[in-house]
Image (cartoon, helix red, strand yellow):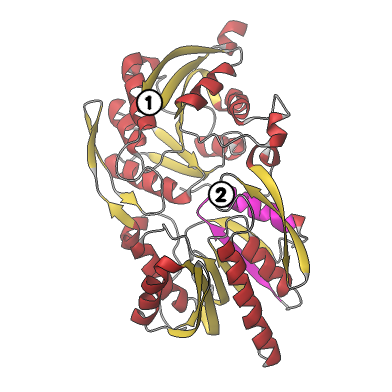
Amino acid sequence: MLIQKPTNTWSGLTVNYINKTAPFKFRGVVFSFDLSHGLFSSAGVDAGTQFLLKIFSRVLDGDIAAHKPLPRRVLDAGCGTGVIGICAAAALSGEDGLYVRCQDRDELARLITSHNAAKNNIPPVTLEAFTEPLLAAAADDKWDLILTNIPAKAGNTVLKDFVSRSCSLLNPEGRVIMVVVNTLAFFFREAIAACGARLLSEEKGAGHTVFVYRGDAGSSALPVNLGSGFLKRYPFYLRASPACIIEEIQINLDTVHGAGGFDKPGGAVLAAAKLLCRLGREKIPPGGDTPFLVHEPGQGFFTNWLLEFMSAANGQKLVLSGRNILSLEAARHNADILCRITINAVPAVDLQLGKDALLEAGGGQFAFIAAFPELLPQTKTAKASQDADQPTAVWNSLPPLLAEGGLFLAAFTSSDAERFDRKKPAGFTRLGSVKRNGFCALAYQETSRKNNS
């Protein structure tokens, strides 16, 4: 089950995740966009996006001159910080019933897009942002315009499907405007031709090419939506099916395009597994009705190893959380194949921002939490506040989430682990650490309630 409640709740996000504010002018309007180290193009509005918007503006002027109806249903696929969707919403603001759907696989992108929309006076009734795969929507949704600065590393099979599926999701006379890096221009030109789409225009710039195309609006292809059987329904997302051995336990997985962790366990997973082996199974409180939580599970190497290590096939409740919706889907898919257990997935930028949804998904506090967070470079605002940095935010999230006597395990780069351990507050006892390949895993037991009883 996916627990996803679109909300613009945003406490602490500005301090910890926004590193820069960039002005940007489009069609005579000056916008202000907050950017993040955690998302693409954190230094300013990137050249590809600027080029796409230039062509979009030209297409819009052509439609106005020809007295054609302007787009009213717009999809921004892979929205990042929301620049394209927000600029489109502003440019089309006079159209009755205008609706812009912004989508990205990253929960941080959803939050920052929603934030930037509000900052630039685009109301939620006009623009909504979602954490979802490319081209996800309701089954009967059709679009007058699909805009995308296509993620070049999404995987060739995903990119080919995007071209053909995007055509099928257009209204009559609808169009796709796509910007790609020049090294992929030939690939997309061939993909457009292969699916029978009509290439309306192509323009090459210094580093990017923009394609404008349309296809068969009568096609039966549906949007790409999450849920049970995701890989069976969309096999083009399957990357590989690797096998490996972690601490003498064989792990078999299906990995997906667009998710971190790739095809083998990283140093953080190996360090975490070794540390749990060193501590012993008895140090992990029994689960049963008290759920386990794995935050940022990647493709699911650690999750499946943990379930095997704990022999947790019977009755264990498991919650997965993290920024990347495709990672969550991969990890849930792999855990479900291993053993039929109750698995909930929660898109969450971090444990603090996801707290309420995590408690709802687990039905209460967690006996065991394993986290593999990426600590982004500190923003200037966070550096000025001793209580606002990301390690402190992780520690502050634990009291409401971790059950009495519960075990918390976290794995970071070695430098981040040192910074995290220095922030340890009272009420947690450090049980041990393990270093592996530049990563460090740390384990702590919650002891504050025991000491206070």
- For marks 2 and 1, the one nearer the N-term is 2
Q: Amino acid at mark 1?
A: Ala
Residue at 37% x, 57% y is 230
Q: Secondary structure at mark 2?
A: loop
Up/down of 283 relative to 388, above or below? above
- Residue at mark 2: 39
Q: Position of residue 397 (x, y in %)?
A: 60, 28
Q: For this rendering, which residue is in front, 16 or 208?
A: 208
Residue at 69% x, 43% y is 10
Up/down of 430 relative to 204, above or below? above
* Numbered disc in front, either 2 or 1: 2
Residue at 45% x, 19% y is 443
Q: Position of residue 308 (x, y in %)?
A: 28, 30
- Residue at mark 1: 272
Q: Which numbered marker is on residue 426?
A: none
The quarter of the displayed image where residue 118 is located: bottom right
Specify the farthest residue to the front.
206
Residue at 70% x, 91% y is 65
Residue 28 shows up from this direction? yes
Residue extent of the magenta highlight: 97-118
Left or right, 406 with respect to 383, comes to: left
Q: Position of residue 350 (x, y in %)?
A: 56, 37
Up/down of 132 relative to 429, above or below? below
